[in-house]
Image (spheres, rainbow, N blue to C red):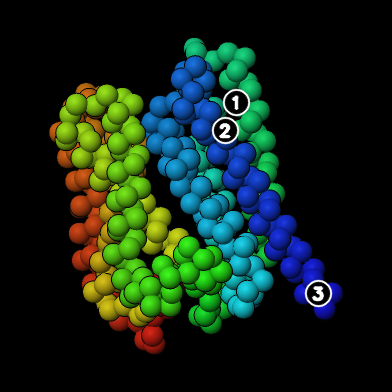
Amino acid sequence: MEHADEKRWTSSAAVAASLGAALVFEALAVLATQDEPVRAIGPWQDDPYDAVVSLGQFMVPIPALVIVLRLLAWRMPGGPDRGQRTMRAAAVMIALVGIALVAEWAAVMSGAHRSSWDGWTGALSGGLATASILTVVAAATLVRCRRARGSSRRWRHDWLGDVVMLCKRTPVLRNWAGPETAAWVRRRAMTVFVALSVLAAVGITGAQAIGERWTNPLLTAWMLIVETTSYLTFCLIGNAIAGFVARPARSRRQRVTETSVITGSVAIQVATAFRDALWPGAAPLTSVPALVALTLGAGLLTSLVTAGLRATWPQPTGSANGSG
């Protein structure tokens, strides 16, 4: 009993530490990217650093939100599943924070925009150091809570089931979400992921286009694709790790397609962040058609190569894990 209580306390501490680190990072990222005077003296104001930080800024709130929502269902049936998946979601969140912090430290250590640094840059660096310490503490606590490999195959209570149970307790939502709705989402998880990714991408792209007063439809369409692929990649990888939606077994073709989408999307993000270094012409890259050709071309090529390689792999024995 004491061992179980200690394990629950450690898990709670890991979740709290992860949420705290994510909150500090998000506050720093929003300040450094959205406040123009602060952005002007920040070392990571340009790509490739800004691309990584911005990605973390928009992605980190998603697992943070679902973790907070899951805390509302913490005492419902399926505690072991809920605890393990929450730890994994926290790990995804901390990984995103860690990648962004590495990019920020790289900008500081490389002396990017050193000529514009002032006293406020030191304050930003202090916030960076604080966020880094909190992230390391959270990561160490999560490692302490890790479970044995393979236990995810016995998961039965996904996050979608928690949403249904919470909706049953809310009069307004009681008739809106039920077991039939959850079953529909599980069967069509990929469609739901794509729809949610497009919805998020439309919001961010629209805000960017209005804020920057874009008039080039090709540039707007390009950003919409880049944002959609980034969110879709997060949905697929995050679901495979944390099991937000328990998906039924997929065919070999579906698994090949999803793997190709993930690798192609990652290639698009990398090509976007390092576009000036990758472009063989004169840097920086300013032509929108060239930008589209470079980034989306890299994603398409990577996706096709992955599909070809993945299709030649031997068929794995046994049933696939449906939660991925």
Q: SS of the residue at dot 1?
A: helix
Q: In the current view of this chain or complex, which residue is farthest to the bottom?
A: 318
133 relative to 41, above or below: below
Residue 87 vertical position relative to residue 95 in the rendered view, above or below: below
Q: How many numbered marks have been drawn onto this rendered protein structure?
A: 3
Quadrant housing the C terminus: bottom left
| Residue plotted at (30% across, 43% down) | 202
> Dividing the picture into quarters, in which one does residue 150 lie?
bottom right
Q: Residue at x 34, y 34 (%)?
A: 207
Q: Please name the amino acid that badge 1 sits on.
A: Leu
Within 10 Å of the Cα at label 2, are there few (<14), some (14-19), or many (20+) other Cα atoms?
some
User: In the rendered image, which residue does mark 3 sit on?
Assistant: 3
- Tell me, yes or no, if residue 301 can be seen here: yes
Binning the other alpha carbons within 10 Å of mark 3 as few (below 14), some (14 to 19) or many (20 upward) gives few
Q: Residues within 10 Å of mark 1 (few under 14, many from 20)?
A: some
Contact check, label 1 and label 3, Cβ < 8 Å? no
Residue denoted by label 2: 28
| Amino acid type for the residue under numbered disc 3 | His
* Nearest the eye: 192 or 290: 192
Residue sitting at x 43%, y 74%: 178
Badges 1 and 2: C-beta atoms under 8 Å apart?
A: yes
The numbered mark, 3 or 2, whose residue comes first in the sequence reads 3
In the image, 303: left or right of 47?
A: left
